[in-house]
Image (tube, rainbow, N blue to C red):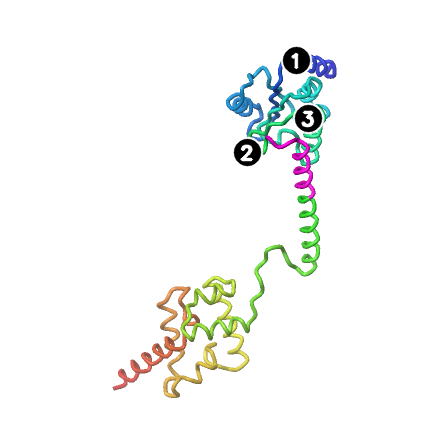
Amino acid sequence: MLLQGMVMEKQELASRHSECAKFGYVRPAQDDPSCVKQIREIVARTAISEECILVEKQILPPETRPAWIAMRKKLKAGDEVIVCDLGRLGRDAAEVLSSVASIAAAGCSLCVLDMPAKLNDIPLSNVLSVILTLANIDKELKSELGHALSIMKPLGGRGGSKPIVSDEQIAEGRRRINMGESVTSVAASLGLSRPGFYKRYKRLELRLAAEQGTVDGNDPEWLKTVPQEQLSYVSAAMARWNSEADEFNQWVGLCWSEKDDLVRAEYEKNCKNKR
């Protein structure tokens, strides 16, 4: 019964469109399941009527589409097939290629509405070459991507991951900040955010402090420049600053001269209180 219905539908379609020299072809799309949008666009942008538009009612493979089969049987050399986009001719590059080849074999032209007008003037044989080239490029890109991911997977890598920044680079960044370069600029040059740089440098300072027994994780090189009488006030100055500053402007992000000023102020304050 179903087969008989399909046969009758094919016959009806073939009879209905036998006089047309231009055929519109529409197929259900995700954003246009009833094909209404496609029909309106073809009617609005071409000189054909709705009677010359063949409508597929189901999503089927090319060889079993009633409207497509009926249109193919009636196509004559010189006729034109109009679609809204290449996706209406197939679900992938292979199906599109097959459909375009079928139209070309009948000696007909193809008009794709979402393509520039000049491209629609290119012979179908050239269109076939372009589609085939794009399909091959797509296949090669997927193959290369798969190969790259297969290499990176054992290494624990994922495509597009950020480069690893070494402790030496973080320490050099800290020296650049001490020389007056902005934290934002240094962090950006290392591929880090400002908070990310602070976090990495704080971790480095704590590790160096544990290894060298320095005061509260401060840079050992900076501590060598602090006057001996002010060394005992470093921790107090650091605690006061961190309690008043926000999380992105903590002591670890200050340059040497800024720390010098804060330690000196803490020292002078305590000296004044003792008088």
Q: Quadrant of the C terminus?
A: bottom left
Camera-side residue of 108 and 211: 108
Q: Quadrant of residue 260?
A: bottom left
Q: Tell me the distance, in whole angstroms, between the alpha carbons under discs 2 and 3.
A: 20 Å
Which amino acid is tagged 3?
Answer: Ile
Placement of 70 over or under 211, stated as above or below? above
Magenta span of residues: 121-136
Q: Per the image, is 123 magenta?
A: yes
Q: Tell me the distance, in whole angstroms, between the alpha carbons under discs 1 and 2.
A: 29 Å
Percent position of residue 57, x then y: 63, 21
Please name the residue that numbered disc 2 is placed on.
116
Camera-side residue of 34 and 189: 189
Q: Quadrant of the N terminus?
A: top right
Q: Dot 3, crowdedness within 10 Å: few (<14), some or many (≥20)?
A: many
Please name the residue that numbered disc 1 is placed on.
18
Q: Residue furthest bottom?
A: 228
| Mark before the other along the chain sequence, 3 or 1 | 1
Which amino acid is tagged 2?
Answer: Pro
- Numbered tag placed on residue 242 in the rendering: none
Percent position of residue 240, x then y: 36, 73
Q: Main secondary structure of the magenta part?
A: helix
At x 67% / y 58%, what residue is drawn?
Answer: 152
Please name the residue that numbered disc 3 is placed on.
103
Which amino acid is tagged 1?
Answer: Ser
Q: Tell me the distance, in whole angstroms, between the alpha carbons under discs 3 and 1.
A: 17 Å
Percent position of residue 262, x then y: 35, 77
Percent position of residue 170, x then y: 51, 71
